[in-house]
Every structure is written in C-alpha cells, then in structure tokens.
Amino acid sequence: MHTKYLDVFQICDSTFPIGTFNHSYGMESYLRDNRIDNSPTFEAWLNAFLKTQYTYGEGLLCKLVFEALKKNQQDDIWKYDRLITVSTTSKETREAAKLVSFRMIELLLALEDDSLLRIYQEKINSGEVFGNPAIVYAIAMREKDLSVDEMIVFYGYSLVSTMVQNAVRAVPLGQIDGQLIVKRSFDTLNNIAEIISSLDDSTLGANSPGIELSQVQHETQVFRLFMS
Amino acid sequence: MDKEFQGIAHIEFMNREGCLVSDKVYNSGNSKVSSLIDLDHERLPCHFLIGMGGGLVEGEKYLLEIKVGRDARGIVSSQAPTYVYKCDNNLTTKQETNINIEKNGVLEYISDAVIPYKDSIYHQIVDINLDESSVLIYSDGITSGWSPDQKKFQYKQVKIKTNVYMDNILVCSDFILLNPVEADLTSIGYFEGFSNYGSMLIISPDVDKVFLEDLRKNVNQLKEDGIEWGASLLEVPGLSVRVLGDSDQMVQKMIMLIANFSRQRLLNSSHLSLRKNIY
C-alpha cells in the first residue's frame, strides 16, 4: 500500500549508487579558498544553490517534464533536455549531469523495465539528447501518483542530503550540524516548490553569477575531492 | 517608426568584392548608430550605439538588429553604459537584440555594462543566429546599479538571456536572473561582494581545449588582482566567460584582455582600440 513512497525513497536516498556524491556543484571551489569553512558558510552556499540553480534548473524541470508527460508531449521533454544542458555554463557540470543521468537510467532499468526510460537511453546513446537526472527522475516517477510539489521537494531533499554528507566529510561539519541544516532546508524546499508553481519554460536554465563562476573555476582546480 | 519600440538601431555589414563595409545603417526613435568610427590599427567597419535619451525609461522597449553578410566583418560597441531608470509602476524595460551572422562572417560586439537604477525592472533578450563557420566575440555586463542612497542592488529585477542558434538549433543559452528583492546579492553564490559582472561568448570553429588553456594562461599572467574570472567550453566550438570585479573599469579591462587574445588567435588581428578612455 505504501510502495509508491518506498520507490521514491529508494531513488532519493543519498546512497542510491548513481555517483551524485562525486559532485560538489561548485562547493569545492569555495572550500579551497576558505569561503566555506564552517556550518553557517556552507548553509549560506546551499541556500543560494537551491534558490538559483535548483529552482530554475532541476526543480523546474520536474514540473515541466511532469506536465509534458501529462499532455503526452514527449518532444517537449527532449527540448527541455537541450535547453537545460546548453544553459549550464560549466562544461564539467554538464558532464556531471550526463554521467549521473546515464548511470541512473541503467540502474532504474535494472530495477524495473520502463519503455520511456529506454527511449531516453537510446536518444542519449545516439547523441540526439544529452541526459539530465531530473528528467530521468520525473519520467521514472510518472506513475507513482505524486504531486508536482512532492516531486520537487523529494528530489530537492536527495540533493540536500547528499550535499550535507559531502560537507560533513569535506568542510568538515559535525553530524548534528549537518542534520540541522537538512532540517532547516525543508522550509526552503517548500518555498521553492511554491515559486516553481508559477514558473514556465521561459525561466528554465536561469542562474546566478557566483554559482556559475564557482563551477567554472572548479575545472582548473588541481587538488580535488570531487569530480565537479 | 514601429510604435512597438521607442528606439530601433539597425546595422548591416557586407563584403563587397573584398571590401569590408557597413550598409543599410539606420536608426529611429531614441536609438542612434554612429557614423563609421575610424580605428587606429585596422580598417574594419565599426559603429557605436548611442542612447539619445540618457537612459531607458520605464516600460520602454528597444530593438537592435545586426546583420553580418557572407565573408563580412564588423565591430559594434556602445558609446557609454546603458542606464535603466526606475520602474515605479512595475512596468518592465526591455532590450531586444537580433544578430545574424552568415557563412564566414565575423562580428565583434563589445558593449558597456547596464546600470539599473533603484526600483528598475530590466529584461534583455539577445538572439544570435550564426553559421558554424562564423566567428563571434560578444560581451555584456551588469552592475550593482545606482541608487540615491548609494546602496547596492536596489533594482527590482534583471533578466539577461542570450540565446545562440547554429543552423537553427539552440547551442547556448546564457541566462542570468537577478532578484535583489528575494535574495541578498552581495552574498555567496550571487555577486559575492563584487559590484560588477561581465559575461562573454567567444564562438569560432577554432576554439577548442588548447585555445581555452592558452587563454587561461595568458589572462592569468596579465590580469589584475581582486578580480575573479573563469571560462568554460560550450557544446559547440566556443566558450563562455564569467567575470566579477569591483569596478566597471576592471571588468572592461578583463573583457578587452580576453577579446584581444581571441581576435589575435582566431582572426590574426591586432589589439582592438575602441578609444574609450579606460582601455
């Protein structure tokens, strides 16, 4: 009876082995020059990331793909795949999204066959589309009877919990401090879901100078714990 | 004049039997295109864009069209920063720009920053169509704005979206959205204490990993302290640049440094001198 939530928990679990923990989304650039060096500075960065790149990127993608699937307009999904990819400034961040989505599709297909995910996989393999984890997630969740808000906060939660674990290891943060940040992110995620409810595809891919620059600068970082 | 726009500027660059010229230059309303500007080092057609009203007023809409024909080349720059006045009635001030570059065409578009006043709302949409053989060196920028009390980021919203299409396929969308009402833009992830932001696109069949590495080495040797920058490759041969600095002058210097490295390597052209004081 509660299987739909268990299916979501499995995918949104930070231990779901798709390599998300290899990526810092630019956070490591701030670690190296000590602009992130404790719990408050990490949390400030996390909030900025959620309110910019997540809101107008993968968060908004959840909603747009959900609506495209509802209207049975698959071509819109492939359009969003290109739009989100070419509006991501850092090549390393784009490659991270491609890699994570590729592994995510493989793993999901191993758990349960899904004809639309197979189509997405074929299109990625043929170079027709690029691959984005939020699109994979929205496709995989399409028959789980979740609301758009639920999809956005659950996906956001998986990002937050992974990033907090990264920060516990790398900043480092105390475990309790980390969990307090996770807890405080719930209000932010709910606000973001509300903001996204009034957005359309014209704001997909919007970002902020600092978040983009940190991801671009990570590409030239010599000593690194994370791939991006 | 089209009543939809308060100002229209139109410039076409052509190649007439090996001669690089500009043609069909016209302007209307509050927009003005300068006559040909004589560059010190090169014989290239160059025009400056001049805003006649001193700045853009609430709810106004401006159009800029630039066409570069086959094998043609041209330079467009602004004469001064663009001021966007306050929008007390929540009407958005808009700048639309359409750029078309045909086969082997080359455009250098170096603009000054936009300075949004307190309570202004500014949306800028730039659509660039080019061929895979075209070369584009493009820059724009935004500042922390102007306010009577000298406080930073007092504008309501700034949206700057630059779409690049190659053979009608979207290959790059450079999209900055700033909402000072919702977030403290001085903090981490936003302007991070800086007041000026510059963005560039360098697109050419000859931009690759080696070009990017050489650009980084060159710029890092010459750049001033106190400025943050980075460049990353696009999905097509080309790259995108981000600059954060403390003054318009510092950011423009970086942009000219990157533009000059690029034009030397990609176009075998000498240093570009636009004869504005700060360069």
Image: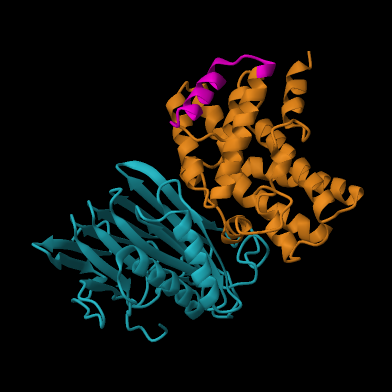
Chain colours: A orange, B cyan
Observer-nearest residue: B110 or B181? Answer: B110
Q: Is residue B93 left or right of residue B131?
A: right
* Residues in magenta, as a range: A110-128
Residue at point 90%, 52% (across, down):
A174
Quadrant housing the C terminus of chain B = bottom left
Whether residue B196 can be seen here: no
Who is closer to the viewer here, A170 or B190? A170
From the top left corner, tell me how far across and down residue B99 is, in percent: 28, 56
Total labels drawn? 0
Where residue B229 appears, x then y in whole percent?
55, 67
Residue B122 percent location from the top left of the image: 44, 62
Q: Residue furthest left?
A: B17
Q: Picture quarter containing residue B153?
A: bottom right
Position in image of residue B37 (x %, y %): 22, 79
Quadrant, the N terminus of chain B: bottom left
Image height check: is A137 above or below B199?
above
Main SS, magenta region, reads helix
Is residue A17 visible in the rendered image? The answer is yes
Left or right, A38 with respect to B137, comes to right
Q: Can you say whether A108 is above or below B229 in the image?
A: above
- The outermost residue toward the bottom is B277
**In the figure, residue A30 lies in which quadrant?**
bottom right
Residue B241, compared with residue B47, is above or below; it is above
From the viewer's side, name the closer residue of B59 and B212. Answer: B212
Residue A125 in magenta stretch? yes
Q: Is residue A174 magenta?
A: no
